[in-house]
């Protein structure tokens, strides 16, 4: 099944992130990254719609709040380790591409956790601030609380 996200293209500042997201997601295939199926433009209202894999679950913020036992031997610690590992695998996939891709807005709210067959599967989404790494690539946005130092200081990016 698929889900749809739309943005009004009347405002150029709002259109650029969604066009960037389309450009990035077209190039990426990984089990822990939301799958891009296509995009379309609404004829009557100039709305850009992304057609994405349907991801049913809760964002990582909710999952973390439910797992309040952080003892190293607890089942919750093991689950969080597995979720973290899968998110890291998605990021490694992005960073090791040639050219590399930097997500630039990794935060719990941009990770949806699905439950399938008794296991948890995180999906990284919202690639609006992402960049393909070039010699001049810089990120102009993201969530300050989760920014890496080079993004926060607007320095040259490296994966």
Image (spheres, rainbow, N blue to C red):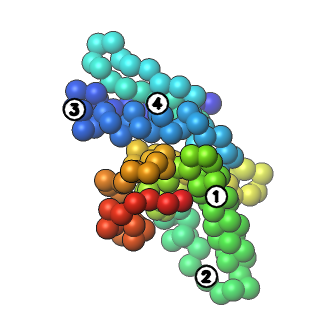
- First in residue order: circle 3 vs circle 4: 3
C-alpha span from label 4 to label 1? 24 Å
Closer to viewer: mark 1 or mark 3: 1
- First in residue order: circle 1 vs circle 3: 3
Query: Considering the numbered disc 2 on the image, is that residue within a helix, a strand or a loop?
Result: loop
C-alpha span from label 2 to label 4? 38 Å
Q: Which mark is residue 92?
A: 1
Closer to viewer: mark 3 or mark 4: 3
Q: Position of residue 141 (x, y in %)?
A: 32, 55
Q: Are marks 3 and 4 in contact (CB under 8 Å)?
A: no
- First in residue order: circle 2 vs circle 4: 4
Q: Position of residue 144 (x, y in %)?
A: 33, 66
C-alpha span from label 1 to label 3? 33 Å
* Up/down of 71 relative to 151, above or below: below
- First in residue order: circle 4 vs circle 1: 4
Q: Which residue carries the number 2 mark?
A: 69
Q: Which residue carries the number 4 mark?
A: 50
Query: Considering the numbered disc 1 on the image, is that residue within a helix, a strand or a loop?
Result: helix
C-alpha span from label 3 to label 2? 45 Å
- First in residue order: circle 1 vs circle 2: 2
| Quadrant that contains the C terminus | bottom right
Q: Position of residue 70 (x, y in %)?
A: 61, 83
- First in residue order: circle 3 vs circle 2: 3
Closer to viewer: mark 1 or mark 2: 1
* Residue 14 appears left or right of 117: left
* Residue plotted at (61% across, 82% down): 69
Closer to viewer: mark 2 or mark 4: 4
Tell me, yes or no, if residue 39 can be seen here: yes
Q: Which residue carries the number 3 mark?
A: 11
* Up/down of 116 relative to 74, above or below: above
* Residue plotted at (44% across, 51% down): 135
| Quadrant that contains the N terminus | top right
């Amino acid at each position: 099944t698929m889900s749809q996200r739309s943005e009004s293209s009347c405002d150029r500042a709002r259109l650029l992130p969604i066009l960037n997201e389309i450009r990035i997601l077209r190039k990426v295939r990984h089990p822990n990254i939301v799958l891009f199926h296509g995009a379309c433009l609404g004829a009557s209202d100039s709305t850009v719609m992304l057609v994405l894999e349907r991801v049913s679950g809760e964002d990582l913020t909710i999952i973390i709040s439910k797992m309040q036992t952080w003892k190293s031997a607890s089942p919750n610690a093991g689950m969080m380790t597995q979720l973290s590992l899968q998110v890291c695998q998605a990021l490694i996939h992005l960073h090791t591409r040639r050219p590399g891709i930097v997500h630039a807005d990794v935060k719990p709210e941009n990770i949806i956790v699905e439950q399938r067959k008794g296991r948890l599967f995180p999906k990284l989404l919202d690639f609006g601030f992402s960049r393909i790494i070039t010699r001049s690539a810089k990120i102009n946005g993201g969530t300050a609380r989760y920014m890496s130092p080079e993004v926060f200081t607007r320095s040259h990016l490296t994966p």
